[in-house]
């Protein structure tokens, strides 16, 4: 089966949130294997950053379902620790 990649974006997340915390929470969603997590400091607010999560898929059907969901709904709100949540978007930077 053909391998697929998808890049997700959390546009605003606390600078104190570690990559390991993000990895653990995203892995709990079972969306695919995480290849890389990229942190980008926000220019306007030094207490926050943007995170890109590059996922790798081998399941074609799962890949298509997830991508279609994002295209139809734009984002998901993922409650990672009640009542806190992240808005997760499909990244415009698909590499």
Image (cartoon, grey):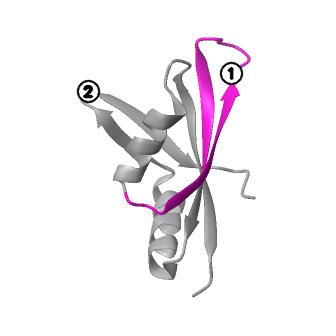
Local packing at callout 2 (Cα closer than 10 Å; few below 14, some 14-19, many 20+) is few
**Residue 78 part of the magenta segment:** no
Quadrant where the image shows the N terminus: bottom right
Horizontal and vertical percent position of residue 37: 61, 43
Q: Does 25 appear above or below 2? A: above
> Which residue is nearer to you in this view: 10 or 27?
27
> Which residue: 62% across, 31% down?
50
- State the residue position of label 2: 83
Q: Which residues are magenta?
A: 30-53
Does residue 73 appear left or right of residue 78 in this picture? right
Does residue 89 appear left or right of residue 93 in this picture? left
Asked which secondary structure carries label 2, the reply is loop
Horizontal and vertical percent position of residue 17: 49, 24
Does residue 30 appear left or right of residue 10 in this picture? left
**What is the residue that sits farthest to the front in this orientation?**
20
**Residue 47 part of the magenta segment:** yes
Q: Does 2 appear above or below 87? A: below
The circle on residue 42 is 1
Label 2 to label 1, Cα distance in Å?
24 Å
């Amino acid at each position: 089966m053909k391998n697929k990649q998808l890049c997700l974006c959390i546009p605003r997340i606390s600078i104190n949130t570690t990559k390991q915390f993000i990895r653990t929470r995203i892995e709990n969603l079972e969306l695919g294997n995480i290849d890389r997590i990229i942190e980008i400091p926000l220019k306007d607010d030094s207490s926050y950053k943007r995170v890109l999560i590059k996922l790798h898929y081998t399941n074609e059907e799962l890949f298509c379902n997830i991508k279609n969901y994002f295209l139809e709904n734009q984002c998901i709100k993922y409650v990672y620790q009640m009542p806190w949540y992240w808005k997760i978007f499909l990244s415009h930077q698909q590499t």
